[in-house]
Image (tube, helix red, strand yellow):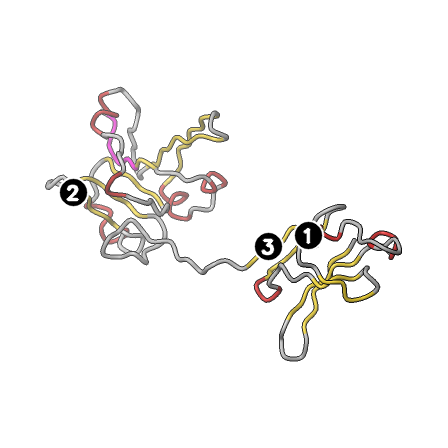
Amino acid sequence: MAIVLTENAQGHREIYGLGEGTKEMYDGNTHRDAKRFGDNAKAVYGNCIFLISDVNANDLLDFAVTRSSVAYLFKGMDKKPVSIVPEKPEATGLIHFYKNAEDGWSFVTSEEYEEKKNELPDLCFATRLPISNFNNRKFEDLKAVLEAGVDLAAEGEPKYSAKYTIDDEQVKTVTISEKEAIEGSLANEMNPIIYVRSCRPAS
């Protein structure tokens, strides 16, 4: 079985399904396995070449063929993630955030970081993850984390620590430098990570 994507001079695309030979799709009287090309596939040549009409070829990005089926990859809607910063929904990169004196959230975007990093508290959160329903999410009480004896001391430059779960069961911990966190190029960034940033000297 094979799939062929065609395009005419006007840019209109069509997709066809072909059997390995006439015996695969036609035994002289009846179709065999024609539904593998979709319920509405139309025979266009000798009952062994079919126009696949259940698939909009103009929305098709790619496809793959197995022995008995076809998988299609379609264009998706161009959705841009919305950042956690209410006033800057287009903000990208590593965003730092913390509870302010009014018990609301303060944010420092990646563009503001160098200018405002000295204004950050000793402990704060940082992520490049667009968090849905941010205001309804519960975050760790960083004071309680310290009281629990977690070592977040950072001599010199800040450090970024995180804990995340792989395959719903394997817990991983990671501690990286300020440079590594800002660049976001490490393998662990494939996971949705929220860091705790510490610039708190050891007591």
Q: Is residue 198 magenta?
A: yes
Q: Amino acid at mark 2?
A: Gly
Tell me which secondary structure the magenta stretch mostly adopts: loop
Q: Amino acid at mark 1?
A: Ala
Q: Amino acid at mark 3?
A: Leu
Crowd tier of the residue under label 1, counting other residues whose Cα lies within 10 Å: few below 14, some 14–19, many 20 or above: few
Q: Position of residue 170 (x, y in %)?
A: 48, 25
**The C terminus lies in quadrant:** top left
Q: Position of residue 121 (x, y in %)?
A: 20, 39
Q: Is residue 148 left or right of residue 188?
A: left
What separation in Å lies between label 1 and label 2 (alpha carbons)?
Answer: 50 Å
Q: Image point 33% across, 44% down: which residue? A: 131
Q: Determine the secondary structure under disc 2.
A: loop
Residue stretch rendered in magenta on the structure: 197-202
Q: Determine the secondary structure under disc 3.
A: strand
Q: Image point 27% across, 20% down: which residue? A: 149
Marker disc for residue 104: 2
Badge 1 or badge 3: first in the primary sequence: 1
Badge 1 or badge 2: first in the primary sequence: 1
Q: Residue furthest front?
A: 29
In front of the other: 180 or 189:
189
Marker disc for residue 64: 1
Q: Position of residue 178 (x, y in %)?
A: 35, 42
Q: Position of residue 30 (x, y in %)?
A: 82, 53
